[in-house]
Every structure is written in C-alpha cells, then in structure tokens.
Amino acid sequence: MEKMTPQVRKAVFPAAGLGTRFLPATKAQPKEMLPLVDKPLIQYAVEESVRSGIRDIIIVTGRGKSAIEDHFDVSFELENLLERRNRMDLLASVRRVSDMIDVSYIRQKEALGLGHAVLRARELVGQEPFAVVLSDDVIDAPKPCLQQLLDVYNEYGASVLALMEVPHDRISAYGVVAAEPVAFNGTSDRLYRVSDLVEKPPAHKAPSNLAIIGRYILTPDIFESIEQSQPGAGGEIQLTDALRHLLRTRPIYGYRFEGKRYDAGDKLGFLQATVEFALARPDLGGKFRTYLKSLKL
Ligand code: UTP
C-alpha cells in the first residue's frame, strides 16, 4: 500500500530572540543578520532549507525586522548600480537567494520563548508538517542536516529532532532527550525513538548526552501542545516542553545528524565558525591561512 505521508513544504525561521549574548551588536539588528564571512547567519539557514527542497520560508521577526525583510527583498537600486558597474558576479550573489524562495513574515511582539515564536507561525503553516530552523545553529554537512531529518520523516511520518552528543559539563545548556536507538539505513547509532525530553537539566539529572539542536521536523499537532504549555525554564514558553506534551500522544524521533555544528549565537562559537568558514573559502582560505600562521600564538 502506498504511504500517505504529507510532504514537508514549509520552514519556520524564528528570528525574534533578544540575542543578549551579542549586545550591543544586536541592539538594532537581530543576531540572525550577523555575517559569517560575508553572508548573514539566516542566509546560510535558508540555503540549507532550499538545498533540502523547502522553498516556502516563514520568518518570525521581532526587532530589526526591516533588516531581514530588506535582505530577502529585491533591491532595484543596488542591482541597477551593480549592473551599470558590470559586477555580474555580485549581482548574481544578491539575486540568488531571493529568487529561490517564497518568503512571508510574522511578528512576535515580545520574546516569550521559542515555543511562542513557533506558535506565531500557525496560520501561515496551516495543517501540514513543517520544519523549524534556528539560524544561530550553523551546520556544515555534506548532506544538509534538514535533508537528513526529512529522510527520517519521510520514512516514519512523525516529528524528528536533530540530536548531537554533548559533553557532561555542557549538557545543562541544552534540551536533552531520553531515547532508545532504532536501526535505520544500515546504522543503529543515529536514529532514536524519544521517550522523554527535558529543557536545560542540571548535569546530574540529564537523561543522556544527546542534546537537541536547532533543526526540527514537526507535525502540526505541535501547535495544540504549545498552547497547553506553561512558561518553563527562564519564564519562556519552551518548545521542548511542548514536545514533551506531544510525546504523550505521538511518537517523536531524534536523529544524530552527520556534520559539524557551530553555536553562532555564542561569541566563541561564532568566532570558530568564522575562522573555519573563511579557511574553507576558495577566494579567501589561502591568504587567511598564511595570516593565521603568521600570528605568534
Ligand atoms: P536563543 O535561546 O539563542 O535566545 O534563541 P536569544 O534571545 O536569541 O539569544 P540570547 O540567549 O539572549 O543571546 C534560539 C532561537 O529562537 C529564537 C531566536 O531568535 C533564535 O533563533 N527565539 C527565541 C525567538 O524567535 N523568540 C523568542 O522569544 C526566543
């Protein structure tokens, strides 16, 4: 019998957090607009989504909304100038992303938490499964992380969370799962069936070393679960708490994705990503490497 798993066509990009770890840079612009080398974080995330076949983009904005909207809009003035100066390479680079996506915006007036931000997208998502992508988790992977999750979703038709192993002394900064491994695609150490989730547990109470990273495939019943959720850790409406509620009635899977994740919402993580992305750039890597080597560290 043919499986009737509805296709994931939309991705929600929460970008309304306060970004306090990056003040004052985030006073007037969202941290999602901070550039890694020469592209804002949110563009890396949108490109990952497009490479995973999802072009319907929903961005949840707070302060600094116009910077994000302008970034994904056509800029006639800029394009005209680049054309007149015959900078076709730059013209292509500013056109490429906005040409590939269909983007809508919804406002989160107050930063009441990630769960609350996702709930704001309810009308735009409707009754279909969707992805959630946190742009401050930058993931470098041969197969886009979102595509890895979609492969699991397409098989199981259930919500899927990206997981990563985290050392014991760092685990309390994350949402953490209790989970049992499930054989998938010839491996038994990547896919997990989640049995419980807890947001930012003290290290000694963490149910495992598997932390939830900012990529999710969610079934639309998550919206009711978010509505049921009371403010949790930090007084915010947490997505992890809503997932825990969803787990009472629906299976949830976790996938330990292949690739390297950078926490670009944190200063050190942002610097690490900057250095590694710059080194990997064909137009920049060689000179940058020579420069780094010249530093007497
Ligand atoms: P973070 O937990 O990194 O919080 O949010 P933050 O406020 O952005 O940053 P800090 O901790 O103060 O430095 C994770 C993701 O969820 C979004 C953020 O924009 C980020 O993409 N978010 C968070 C919202 O959209 N709304 C919220 O109310 C909270």
Image (cartoon, rainbow, N blue to C red):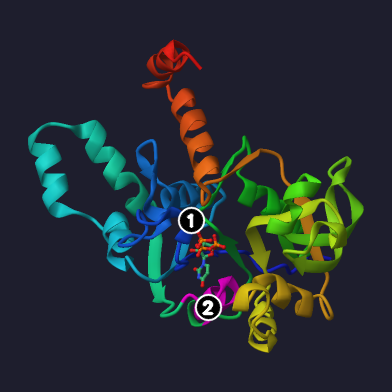
Magenta stretch: includes residue 287: no
Tell me the CA gap for discs 2 and 1: 17 Å
Is ligand 1 closer than 8 angstroms to the Cβ of mark 1?
A: yes
Image vertical order of residue 227 relative to residue 81, above or below: below
- Residue 286 in percent (x, y) is at 42, 14
Secondary structure state at the residue bearing disc 2: loop
Residue 192 appears in which quarter of the rendering? Answer: bottom right
- Residue 166 in percent (x, y) is at 75, 46
- Residue 136 in percent (x, y) is at 52, 52
Q: Is residue 207 visible?
A: no
Q: Is residue 142 left or right of residue 19?
A: right
Question: What residue would you read off at disc 1?
Answer: 21
Mark found first going from the N terminus, 2 or 1: 1
Q: Is residue 130 visible?
A: yes
Specify the label residue 112 is tagged with.
2
Residue appearing at x 70%, y 77% in the figure: 242
Is ligand 1 closer than 8 angstroms to the Cβ of mark 2?
A: yes
Q: Bounds of the magenta span?
A: 111-122
Residue 71 appears in which quarter of the rendering? Answer: bottom left
Q: Residue furthest left?
A: 84
Mark 2 Cα-neighbour bin, 10 Å: few <14, some 14–19, many ≥20: some
Residue 94 appears in which quarter of the rendering? Answer: top left
Residue appearing at x 69%, y 48% in the figure: 148
Q: Are marks 2 and 1 in contact (CB under 8 Å)?
A: no
Specify the label residue 137 is tagged with.
none
Image vertical order of residue 3 relative to residue 80, above or below: below
